[in-house]
Image (cartoon, grey):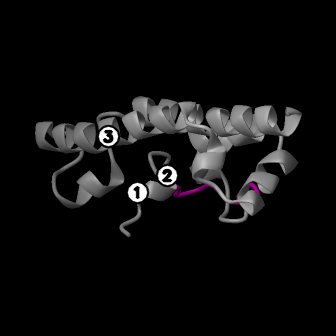
Amino acid sequence: MFEWIEEYAKHATLNFGQALQGMRYLLTHPRADRVAARGSPRHAWLSLRMRSRLVANDLLFAILPPRWHHSREELAGFRAIPFGRWFQYGYCAWRFTDTGAPREDLSGVDRRWDPRCDDA
């Protein structure tokens, strides 16, 4: 039972971190840079549309049990990482590599970025 609670809490922590990151940069998004000049009303509108969807998605997934949409292997990884790091993975993903290790050089990193900013 404790495993389930830990998985759920860490998953919610990650998703709340992502939602807060989205709210922090609500009016600016790296993908909107390709369409409109940063700081323009059009850029803000496009960013708002993209970010608000991500924030809604993050809040939804924060309340859904992680066992509904993650594999057992992924969940085992949740348990191995502390709560604070899960929040950081969501709130400031730009600070970490794909493996979860802290980046050594943060110069030139766009702090608005999160993994979902990349085109699929």
In the figure, residue 24 lies in which quadrant? Answer: top left
Q: Position of residue 28 (x, y in %)?
A: 31, 41
Would you call the spot at circle 1 few (<14 residues within 10 Å), some (14-19), or many (20 or more)? some
Q: Residue at x 34, y 53 (%)?
A: 30
Question: What is the C-alpha distance between the residues marked 3 and 2?
Answer: 14 Å
Q: Amino acid at mark 3?
A: Arg
Part of the protein shown in magenta: 100-110
Q: Amino acid at mark 1?
A: Cys
Q: Does 104 lie within the magenta span?
A: yes
- Give left or right: position of 94 versus 13: left
Q: Quadrant of the C terminus?
A: bottom left
Q: Does 4 lie within the magenta span?
A: no
* Disc number lying in front (1 or 3): 3
Question: Is 28 located above or below residue 110 in the figure?
Answer: above
Q: Secondary structure at mark 3?
A: helix
First in sequence, mark 3 or 2: give its number. 3
Residue behind mark 2:
114
Q: Quadrant of the N terminus?
A: top right
Q: Secondary structure at mark 2?
A: loop
Q: Residue at x 64, y 50 (%)?
A: 95
Q: Residue at x 13, y 36 (%)?
A: 41
Q: Residue at x 74, y 55 (%)?
A: 102
Total tally of numbered discs in the picture:
3
Question: What is the C-alpha distance between the residues marked 1 and 2?
Answer: 6 Å
Residue behind mark 3:
53
Question: What is the C-alpha distance between the residues marked 1 and 3?
Answer: 12 Å
Residue lying furthest left in this view? 42
Considering depth in this image, is 111 or 71 the residue closer to the camera? Answer: 71
Circles 1 and 2, Cβ within 8 Å, touching? The answer is: yes
In the figure, residue 9 lies in which quadrant? Answer: top right
Q: Amino acid at mark 2?
A: Asp
Residue behind mark 1:
117
